[in-house]
């Protein structure tokens, strides 16, 4: 088992690491399944001719909206998958539960809410303020 070299990462111990890894792997499987299902639905629409040329302007708007929504969901799914994979890497390299920006411990409550969190609350708040 790959956790055998990891005894404790800050305040997170071996059983907690294993719990977080299982949660992250389950989340990853769910996201992959959702992305796969969205692509399958889009493919079915295309082969059924549902996205053939619309003759009414309202239908064209609906078609455009559905394409944008499918793209957004696939993009978000990809971003979440990347975050989940990075969290698994941090578990494996021993840096999990530490902020990638300041190095301080990420609170256990934050990790329980968002197991793939990269930033502590202070750094996340700072990042969000800069984005506004």
Image: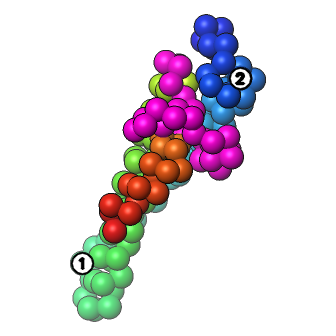
When the figure is inspected, residue 12 is found, relative to residue 23, above or below; the finding is: above
Assign a secondary structure to mark 1. Answer: loop
Q: Which residue is at 28% across, 83% downward? A: 60
Disc 2 crowd rating (10 Å Cα; few below 14, some 14-19, many 20+) is few
Q: Nearer the viewer, residue 29 or 61?
A: 29
Residue receiving disc 1: 53
Q: Position of residue 28 (x, y in %)?
A: 55, 39
Magenta part, dominant SS: loop
Q: Which residue is at 49% across, 51% downward? A: 122
When the figure is inspected, residue 81 is found, relative to residue 4, above or below; the finding is: below
Give the quarter of the image for residue 44: bottom left
Q: Quadrant of the N terminus?
A: top right
Q: Position of residue 104 (x, y in %)?
A: 51, 35
Residue receiving disc 2: 13
- Can residue 2 be spotted in the picture? yes
Q: CA distance from mark 2 to mark 1?
A: 58 Å
- Indicate yes or no whether the magenta region holds residue 70: no
Assign a secondary structure to mark 2. Answer: strand
Give the quarter of the image for residue 76: bottom left
Give the quarter of the image for residue 19: top right
The segment highlighted magenta reads 92-116
Q: Which residue is at 33% across, 62% downward? A: 131
Q: Position of residue 83 (x, y in %)?
A: 45, 41
- Left or right: residue 55 versus residue 90 is left
Whichever of labels 2 and 1 marks the residue nearer the N terminus, that label is: 2
Residue depth check, mark 2 versus mark 1: number of the one nearer the observer: 2
When the figure is inspected, residue 59 is found, relative to residue 1, above or below; the finding is: below
Q: Position of residue 78 (x, y in %)?
A: 40, 47
Q: Nearer the viewer, residue 35 or 3?
A: 3
């Amino acid at each position: 088992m790959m956790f055998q070299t990891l005894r404790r990462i800050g305040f997170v111990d071996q059983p907690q690491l294993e719990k977080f890894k299982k949660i992250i792997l389950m989340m990853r499987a769910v996201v992959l399944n959702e992305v796969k299902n969205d692509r399958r639905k889009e493919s079915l629409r295309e082969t059924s001719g549902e996205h053939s040329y619309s003759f009414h302007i309202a239908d064209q708007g609906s078609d455009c909206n559905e394409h944008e929504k499918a793209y957004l969901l696939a993009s978000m799914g990809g971003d979440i998958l990347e975050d989940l994979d990075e969290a698994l890497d941090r578990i494996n390299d021993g840096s999990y539960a530490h902020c990638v920006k300041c190095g301080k411990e990420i609170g256990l409550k934050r990790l329980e809410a968002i197991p793939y969190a990269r930033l502590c609350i202070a750094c996340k708040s700072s990042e969000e303020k800069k984005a506004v």
